[in-house]
Image (cartoon, helix red, strand yellow):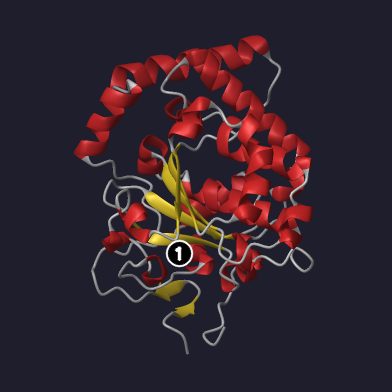
Amino acid sequence: MNKFNCKMPECVIEDKIGDVEAALDLVTIPDDVKEYARVRLGETPETRTQMLEELRELIYQRGDITPVKMDDEYLLRFLRARNFKLEPTYRLLENYCRFREENIDYYENVNPMDLHYIGDLDILSVLPYREQNGRRIMIYKIGNWNPAEIPVDDIFRGTLATLEAGMLEPRAQILGGVAIFDMQGLTMNHVWYITPSVVSKVIQIMATSFPMKISAIHVVHESWIFEKIFSMFKPLIGNRYKDILFFHGDDMKSLHKHIDPKYLPIVYDGIRPDYGYAQWFSSLSSDQRVVKEMEQLGYVTKPYIINENS
């Protein structure tokens, strides 16, 4: 048996430090995060009310997009992603709607738990705690991906389901998240599968078409093969993303300058165990509000059993 003893709807996770929170917090906004939102995003109760009204009016006035939802909580994540600036918010919402329409099979009738094998293979994971600045950490280990066996579309499905669930948390909407791309084990075989279409979708998800702020992207264990892949992305990355992109190679002390080792797995010279993708979605079966929100986005959230010996 591994360190997880999981059977839906409950999931017990090893937690020696006492700050593990795999379940989503859909309500709490600590005072320091509220102050961050006021200073960095321009968010106050007054601006929220005003900008929600203006955004909704603009949607009706232009009539060229049909958002999945129109409630305040849903629209608010787009305003927060663009610092309460109306036109950039509308463009983001427009891009998001278009991306969904063009890739509806990433959403409809997708059960995130059916993609648990991506986590079992340690390709994608979300740590069930927040780092020192209150942000969630998402980790990709691209070298563990076998493109011949796992369609890249499944990686996108798992990514989007993870982000959509994460964006239900007000703190994530305000503070954004941190991504670690671990390139250990990357081969030329991966390069052949990184097509222009794949590059375009990655840019859409990370930069132009999803209401998720990325505060930092950390690349570790990169090699000359990674440089070949990155050369396809580099011309498409805006200046802001160049400012939040950090390369560390095999130097974990360099990574620790940004993320305290207290909040990193042992593999990155931290002190934490590895946590899997499946545990991130264990909250779907226990929090009916999360279930409802995900189903409204088109996901299927039927009960799922995690085999204790998997």
Comparing 155 with 74, the one in front is 155
Which residue lies most toward the front here?
224
| Image coords of residue 256 (percent x, y) | 31, 55
| Image coords of residue 140 (percent x, y) | 54, 58
In the picture, measured across the screen, residue 296 lies left or right of residue 102, that is left
Element marked by disc 1: loop
The type of residue carrying mark 1 is: Ser
In the picture, measured across the screen, residue 238 lies left or right of residue 249, that is right
- Split into 4 quadrants, where in the image is the C terminus? bottom right
Which residue lies most toward the top here?
61
Q: Residue at x 49, y 58 (%)?
A: 139
Comparing 217 with 26, the one in front is 217
When the figure is inspected, residue 33 is found, relative to residue 220, above or below; the finding is: above
Comparing 286 with 281, the one in front is 281
| Image coords of residue 225 (percent x, y) | 65, 55
When the figure is inspected, residue 255 is found, relative to residue 39, above or below; the finding is: below
Q: Residue at x 47, y 68 (%)?
A: 279
From the image, tell me which residue sits under label 1.
Answer: 286
| Image coords of residue 199 (percent x, y) | 70, 41
Q: Residue at x 70, y 35 (%)?
A: 99
When the figure is inspected, residue 191 is found, relative to residue 273, above or below; the finding is: above
Which residue lies most toward the left here?
31
In the picture, measured across the screen, residue 244 lies left or right of residue 277, that is left
Q: Residue at x 34, y 76 (%)?
A: 14
The local crowd at label 1, few if under 14, some if 14 to 19, many if 20 or more residues have their Cα within 10 Å, is some
In the picture, measured across the screen, residue 241 lies left or right of residue 66, that is left
Residue 49 found in image quarter: top left
